[in-house]
Amino acid sequence: MTLLAQIPPLQIPDIAWSAISPELVLFGVGILALLLDTAGPQRLQASFLVFGFAAAGAGYIALSTEQSVLPGLVGLAALGQFALTAIWRDRPRLLSALLAALGFAGAIGVTTWQWGAYSGRLVGADAATFVGTDSLLGGMVAVDGVALFTRVTVCLAGLVTVPLSFAYAEERRIHRGEYYPLLLFAATGMTLLASSADFIMVFIAIEVLSLSLYILAGFAKRDLNSQEAALKYFLLGAFSSALLLYGIALVYGVTGSTNIAEAGRAFSSLDAPQGMAVAAMALLIVGFGFKTAIVPFHMWTPDVYQGAPTPITGFMAAATKAAAFAAFLRVFVGAFAPLQWSWTPVLWVLAALTMLAGAILAVVQNDVKRMLGYSAVAHAGYVLIGFVAVNRAGVSGVLVYLLIYTFMSLGSFGVLALLERRNHKAMAIDDLRGLGRRDPVPAGMLALFLLSLAGIPGTAGFVAKFAVFRAGIEAGHAALVVIAVVSSVIAAFFYIRVIVAMFMEDVPEGVAAEAPLAPSTGMSAGIAFSAAVMVAFGTVLPFLLVDLADQAATFVS
Amino acid sequence: MENVLTPPAGSPVDFAWLIPVVPALSAGLLLVFGKRLGRLSSAVAILSIGFSATLSTMVFAFLQAQPEEGRVFVRTLGTWLSVGGADGLRVDWALLIDPLASVMLLLVTWVGLLIHVYSLGYMAHDERNPQFFAYLNLFAASMLILVTGSSFLTLFVGWELVGLCSYLLVGFWFERRDYATAAKKAFVVNRIGDVGFMIAMFLIFATFGSLTFADVLPAVSTAATGVLIAVGLLLFVGATGKSAQIPLFVWLPDAMAGPTPVSALIHAATMVTAGVYLVARASPLYLEIPDVGLLVAWVGAATAFVAAAIACAQVDLKRILAYSTVSQLGYMFIGVGVGDYTAGVFHLLTHGFFKALLFLAAGSVMHAVADETDIRRMGGLFSKMPVTAVTSLIAVLAIAGFPYTSGFFSKEEVLASAAARPGAQGIWVLGILVAGMTAFYMARWFVLIFLGSPRWAEGVRPHESPPSMTLPLVVLAVGSAAGGLLNTSPEDGFLHHWLEPSVAAFAADGHFLSEGLLLGAALGVAAVGGLLGALLYLRVDVATVGVGGGARNAARRRYYVDEVYETIVMRPGRAMADAFAAFDRRGIDGAVNGLARMTAGVATVGRRTQTGFVRSYALAVLAGTVLIAALFASGVVFGGIR
């Protein structure tokens, strides 16, 4: 007893953990899923242990801080995972997938709570701890509109990817225990990247998400294409990370700080353009340009998108892009705005190149996944218009675009995954001939996503394009918007070519009748949800999203 | 429309948005999961429309409890479109709940509910039953959006959606080619009207800078008369499409290809009245341009006459009702055209009852005689299906204007208004004539189906329909008989006061005949027509029905309107389309293909950069870095120091 009394009371440093609560949720669930998978037959015992520790921790917090909501939620989550484990202890994959889906949903919930506090709708003691300060976690993390919006985008992408993956991975015999944890870790990196307020954090987040994605891209290890994709992605990713790191080092060299906002202030107070500063910006653009697949740093995209397991491709195209663009926005439009005279012409040229090259190269592709890979490049170019605008409308347009693109991308890759399950091979455009007659529902869904990607009014894709084009026009970049429209016309060609093949051409002669499609419930749900989002944001509620993004288009400074 | 209020929180009006949303959600649910739900889907559909009906009733009761000057509410849900800044186009998702909308809500939801129930029996054996209920729900939701829209554009959304539902439901049995063609015809003809509506909206926005009723309608007196005339005419073009008036009425009779409950709900009771509703909703506008109103009335009268004449010569039981609908819609346009909007809406409501009843009865008859639709092969069904027969009789009396039935009050009011409008006496005369013809063809319809000797085909065993079908008949019969109580007198009836906040008042100018004479003339002509029809066809030799040359043949052939349209519209249209197609192939396609080939050529060259070797990709990254550095450098050099 005397010994116990001598231990000084535990000092909890005052860390605003709530600032990274979505990341904590994602990471925690990822670890949990990994643990339960590793535990094998002792799954239930492991789960009970987790429950015990979590409950004890929650009890301690409740007693020591007199808070009730947080410990209550933690306790509930702990109990929930134990219940799930107890019910599905013999079906580890399903358990893993359920946990992952719940993790993404939970992260969205936490982010919504943060948004409530951020936008001032939620007031209270908790709210004040992380809102509007630039020194969260030592200036590492920013909680602002862009971060919150992107977190939701990433988590929604994850939430749709999980059901799309389940039957696909099962079928391709790549359903291993690490799959969902890796998805969650990648998402952790992405949300962290979106809210990084410091270059060091940016780098760490990029590495966290990249390492997970390298593995996921090569997850079909018996498939040579998948291996090739992973290796290429890894080598080039390492190369671009090095360039990014070099850029960060130069920023530190010029400004003496790695904090993004501080670096921006120091940059703008430079008297004359300085070679080092310019080199730093150039290298940062290369680093971000690689992750967001901007021409000429896009070369890896078609190869990797084609080789990676299809649901992962959709997730990579959507969520990685959203996260990397968010960090890109924070650094350039947020912090380096005073220097816009120097970097907007550069991004202008890159945007034009990206839009045109992506669209033109997609025209000659036969593999549908590869075609969508190039189309993803073109879409990155449209997003860049919002950057070049350097105004609030531009930021809001980028956010809207990325959220809507998430669903277009996941939806179209989801339908492809569904078709690949039956055909057991990559889909060429010729394989889609006559699909509209045999399987009208999946074909119709794919047509909807393609029309949306093409930006046809009445779909969400139009709203997205409209948002960035409007920002571009308002900022006086009419020429760039004209290029974008030309690129959209070229892009419409290859999207509509697929639709024509599906609905207006017959099944080629000599092709044996195929087994009927057997969509799993998860796949149907994921695709239908994405399609519903396409239609809802295209027709009924376009400006709900735009208004929300307008509110979110802010940075902490 | 000057005094627009925001509904108090928690009141039924505050939740009125659920009235269209719940059936819409149900429709979505049934479309996706209909197959799995199976039998349950009809229950879901009926519950959802039942919910809307209940809430609509609560909304009505709530409005009634409000003071007379405080019955116009706008419930805004959120921004739909917002383009071009503060002075630009801004349209909200908002509901306009006022006395006019509330009676339309009641009509659509309650008649809709009855027809959902009826379909339970009627569509029981169709394998695509869940899909049918999904479409019915979707239609109800669309119609409810139409009547609650707070701006021309939201009304137009409902307007287009009901058109879509009509297309889907007319072509529900699309396996039959002529049914699919009928659906296409309905769609295309409606589009012509829609173009008018759209141009009207452009003009409205250009003139008033807004599309919201609450902004536009109080401001109509400030606009130039020329613009108002154009808007009024164009809106009426839209109305003639949807409400099947001359010259766009040809689609409605063909639309009878759809299942009978659909004909009752969409092509009799609700959707086709949308044009009347539109004119009534825009009544302040039409009040400024009385001459356009008179034109509307004349078109209505002419349509009523032509359609009634055609109806006298048809032998298909649903087609007769279809032309009768066109004719009755003509009456409604007479009402709103001469400026008595209450009378027009009143006839819309009573017609909703008795025409829905007639169609449902027709469906019940078809159900009994193995889907036969030729009235020459019916007869003597009275004793076999007494409920259907008696309810039909009530509806026939109502539509013929038998004293104290609902049709009597509403038709008299329309005719009296025509008589009270200077310059509209000719319309009144036509109206009286049509009243006689209506009584004639309805008597013919009833007598040939239910009375006389049985003439149905061998092996057919007529029987009364199940309760799910007869119950709606009985309810509608009560409405048809007693619906006149809504507005027993033009000056101080209930509906007259009720609609005062919504529609412009009618400025009566004295009748050119005494009221007694007006009434007597209408009743007399109708009685003569009815008796004539009954006596002629009670002992008729059916071999002489539906034959005969001259005027009768012309009427039977629908005055060759379809053929004329084919010659003057379709053939030149097709020739023009062919010419455009040829130009498209030779001219435009050449240019496009050239560009496409050029693009492909560029792409083939660009493709070579994609070697697949990581080392060359890394080289590209390096080259890109140099490019960016060069761009920065040129910017710094040419851009100079800030």
Image (spheres, coloured by chain):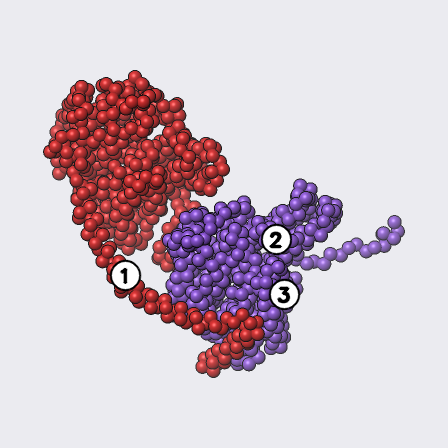
Chain colours: A purple, B red
Mark 2 is on which residue type? Arg
Q: Residue at x 53, y 56 (%)?
A: A425
Mark 1 is on which residue type? Asp
The answer for how far apart the CA atoms under marks 3 and 1 are is 54 Å
- Above or below, A417 against B279 in this view is below
Q: Position of residue B137 (x, y in %)?
A: 40, 37
- Above or below, A165 against A478 in this view is above
Q: Which mark is residue A173?
A: 2
Chain ID, mark 2: A
Q: How many marks?
A: 3
Q: Position of residue B377 (x, y in %)?
A: 25, 25
Q: Are marks 3 and 1 in contact (CB under 8 Å)?
A: no
Between circles 3 and 1, the one closer to the viewer is 1
Between circles 2 and 3, the one closer to the viewer is 2
Secondary structure of the residue carrying tag 1 is: helix
Mark 3 is on which residue type? Glu
Secondary structure of the residue carrying tag 3 is: helix
Q: Which mark is residue A207?
A: 3
Q: Residue at x 50, y 80 (%)?
A: B630
Residue closer to the observer: B109 or A218: A218
Asked if badge 3 and badge 1 are on a common chain, one would say no
Between circles 1 and 2, the one closer to the viewer is 2
Q: Residue at x 62, y 49 (%)?
A: A97
Label 1 sits on residue: B584
Q: Residue at x 50, y 77 (%)?
A: B627
Mark 1: give few (<14), some (14-19) or many (20+) Cα within 10 Å: some
Viewport quadrant of the N terminus of chain B: top left
